[in-house]
Image (cartoon, helix red, strand yellow):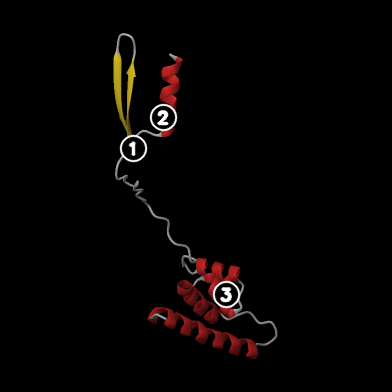
């Protein structure tokens, strides 16, 4: 386990203890104190909303709303402003040579980067004429 993940899990464990103590000592159905919510928001910032809510037995929706209210991006990664798409380079482009001979003429076509569909279309066009 890395240092960061062990530190996060320790803070979750410590916060779990604090929540358990609060739950045992609370009066009736008292609301969770802001101090505990703030600590849960900090843990959720690095550990994620769902994991934190599950570990602390909290409503994930409420925790997410608290994070938004605190100005924390609720576990969503920012969308990139620019994405470069790189096409794969083919080692060698497929190619073919087509030779046609008629009564009075001859034609030779050397075609690079040909696909079977392109060749079929050319054949149909030549046969139709």
Mark pair 1, 2: CA separation: 12 Å
> For numbered disc 2, what is the local secondary structure?
helix
Q: Nearer the viewer, residue 9 or 87?
A: 87
Please identify the quadrant where the C terminus is shown: top left
Neighbor class of circle 3 (other Cα within 10 Å; few <14, some 14-19, many 20+) is many
Tag 1 residue = 94
| Dot in front, 1 or 2 | 1
- Asked if residue 102 is positioned above or below residue 85 in the image, the reply reads above
Tag 3 residue = 53
The part of the image, by quadrant, that contains residue 37 is bottom right
Q: Residue at x 33, y 31 (%)?
A: 96
- Tag on residue 118? 2
In percent of width and height, residue 2 lies at 39, 80
Q: Decide if residue 78 is on the left or right side of residue 84.
A: right
In percent of width and height, residue 46 lies at 45, 73
Q: Earlier in the sequence, mark 3 or mark 1?
A: 3
- Asked if residue 59 is positioned above or below residue 87 in the image, the reply reads below
In percent of width and height, residue 108 lies at 29, 21
The part of the image, by quadrant, that contains residue 29 is bottom right
Mark pair 3, 1: CA separation: 56 Å
Mark pair 2, 3: CA separation: 57 Å
């Amino acid at each position: 386990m890395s240092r960061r993940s062990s530190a996060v899990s320790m803070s979750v464990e410590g916060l779990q203890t604090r929540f358990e103590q609060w739950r045992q000592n609370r009066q009736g159905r008292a609301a969770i104190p802001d101090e505990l919510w703030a600590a849960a928001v900090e843990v959720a910032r690095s550990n994620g909303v769902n994991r934190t809510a599950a570990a602390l037995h909290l409503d994930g929706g409420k925790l997410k709303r608290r994070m938004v209210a605190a100005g924390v991006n609720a576990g969503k990664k920012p969308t990139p402003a620019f994405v470069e798409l790189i096409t794969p380079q083919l080692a060698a482009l497929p190619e073919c040579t087509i030779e046609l001979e008629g009564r009075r003429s001859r034609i030779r076509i050397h075609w690079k980067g040909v696909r079977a569909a392109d060749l079929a279309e050319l054949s149909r066009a030549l046969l139709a004429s």
